Amino acid sequence: MCHCHKLGEGGVDGRVSSLGVGDQVGPINAPTVFNAAFNMAQFWDGRAADLQAQAGGPPMNPIEMASESWDEIIAKLDQDALLKADFRRVYANGVTGDNITDAIAEFEKTLITPDSPFDRYLKGDSDALTAQQKHGYQLFQQNKCGTCHTGSTLGASPMRSWG
């Protein structure tokens, strides 16, 4: 079970700093996985160019997942005969580090929210948002948040350090 990207809770863990292996506290929180395919780069600091590059980071991070190597991960996954067979059906060379990160990236590409209340509001459905949400959007516009938060997901672009 993924503890950092809870799909039922907006694709995040709801924490200021995410918990890792042994309840170690990480330095930042986990960004949402929803609509990540539209990000110009991955991670809060943009250090991964795409979803596959991002997927390779957490497994080797000593706080997040603390694996020693891809061989260690592959050995664990190979114990599941069904998973191993599924990988063989999709990837000729079976379970490899590259194939694991590709599979994660392909899954993340399905986590799209094309019909959110905000999407419907922008398409003209004035009842799609609550009064509080409309007020928030008005503040977003008045305070020129769109200067940085642009694109289809209103994500910040380019990456900036704010402290």
Image: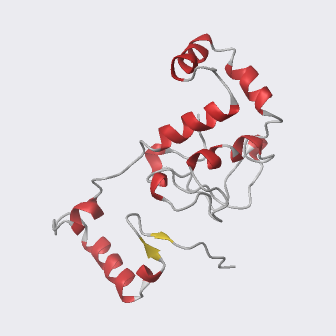
Q: Position of residue 121 (x, y in %)?
A: 22, 66
Give the percent coordinates (x, y) of residue 60: 77, 42
Residue 106, compared with residue 154, is above or below; it is: above
Quarter of the picture containing the C terminus is: bottom right
Picture coordinates of residue 144 (x, y %)?
Answer: 41, 86
Residue drawn at (55%, 47%) of the image: 5
Rendered-image quadrant of the N terminus? top right
Q: Residue furthest top?
A: 81
Q: Residue at x 54, y 41 (%)?
A: 105
> Residue 79 vs residue 72: left or right?
left
**In the foreground, 19 or 113:** 113
- Residue in view at x 60 percent, y 47 percent: 4
Say which quarter of the image contains residue 48. bottom right
Q: Is residue 163 left or right of residue 52?
A: right
Q: Residue furthest right?
A: 68
Q: Splitting the image into 4 quarters, where does residue 123 fall?
A: bottom left
In the displayed structure image, the side of residue 140 where residue 78 appears, left or right:
right
Total numbered badges shown on the rendered structure: 0
Kindly identify the residue that appears in the image at 63 percent across and 20 percent down. 94
Q: Is residue 123 above or below residue 52?
A: below
Q: Where does the image place residue 125, in percent across and percent down from the top left?
A: 16, 65
Horizontal relation, residue 25 to residue 12: left or right: right
